[in-house]
Image (cartoon, rainbow, N blue to C red):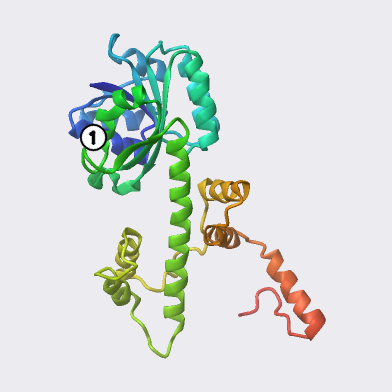
Amino acid sequence: MRMAMIGLGKMGGNMVRRLRRAGIEVVGFDRDAKTVGALAEETGMIAAASVIDAVAKLEAPPAPKIVWLMLPSGAATEDQLRELVSKLATGDIVVDGGNSNYRDGQRRGAMLAEQGIGFMDAGTSGGVWGLENGYCLMVGATPEVAEVVEPILKALAPAPDRGWAHVGPVGAGHYSKMIHNGIEYGMMQALAEGLDLLKGKQEFNFDLAQVTELWRHSSVVRSWLLDLTAEGLKNDQELADIAPFVSDSGEGRWTVIDAIEQGIPAPVLTMALQMRFASQDKKGYSYRLLSLMRNAFGGHAMKKAGENK
């Protein structure tokens, strides 16, 4: 089996490595020619000089051409899809494995269907650990497209019989990944707040590395996130070199927006997103206003900029 992988960053590159281990031939392209050359030398991937070259190096019919995109959501994916349309034929398949909005996936799937081209939206989880552990893949597609891509999904997943699923029609893959990431926000926020409380209880002088390692074994809150946190705290519990800034990828926002549109309360997921926004507020204007109000109604002291807390 042969496929093309467009985008060879941390995720795309490791996916190529895992596919090659499974014996699947991969034609790879990235804007960074050095990355393409290095990965081709390392894995036996077939190097492509452009997207058009990558498509040309796929097997000829009757086997359908499969092009997997691992690109940033938005314009990068949109532009690439539109370029691909004229290079593919009826029966060929495009897979979007990036963090695209599920509505974009539905629209793109409909656009490609008009040309007789199959589309799959693949919600992909596993991060930099996916190479060794496998990727969790939740995909949306027609049954026919899912059947063709299945060998690739089995190779990327933790095992052929688990860690991947055809969860519904086009759009369902990225929607389930969106909700997955919203839940992830909430879990991370809960762990962070709980450990902050432990650290603040100075009379007990908790060893956070000890506590998190303890929780990893048979506790109700054990999880992979806890595993990673415990590992990180082994060497550094103060985290003084880490800036208190947490970015949001976009999927947390989409999850909260969807909760509002459905009229379904999601206070934990919403607050976790809002806390990320708070960490990004360099000006801290709302907090300055709060201090102003407290001083106005209660005469509470206001600290000047630069004063210690």
Name the amino acid, label 1: Ala
Q: Residue furthest front?
A: 263
Closer-to-camera residue (300/43): 300
Q: Can you give x and y, in whole percent of width and height, for residue 41 in the image?
A: 22, 29
> Circle 1 — which element?
helix
Residue 17 visible (yes or no): no
Q: Residue at x 30, y 16 (%)?
A: 58
Q: Residue furthest right?
A: 296
Residue 58 visible (yes or no): yes
Vertical order, 74 against 300 (above or below): above
Drawn side of residue 83 relative to residue 124, left or right = right
Q: Residue at x 37, y 86 (%)?
A: 205
Q: Can you give x and y, in whole percent of width and height, for residue 90 in the image?
A: 40, 11
In the rendered image, which quarter is residue 95 located in?
A: top left
- Quadrant location of the N terminus? top left
Please name the residue that numbered disc 1 is placed on: 155
Q: Can you give x and y, in whole percent of width and height, for residue 97 in the image?
A: 40, 34
Q: Can you give x and y, in whole percent of width and height, for residue 281 in the image?
A: 62, 60
Vertical order, 91 against 230 (above or below): above
Drawn side of residue 62 relative to residue 289, left or right = left
- Quadrant location of the C terminus? bottom right
Drawn side of residue 170 relative to residue 267, left or right = left
Q: How many marks?
A: 1
Drawn side of residue 61 relative to residue 121, left or right = left
Closer-to-camera residue (126/148): 148
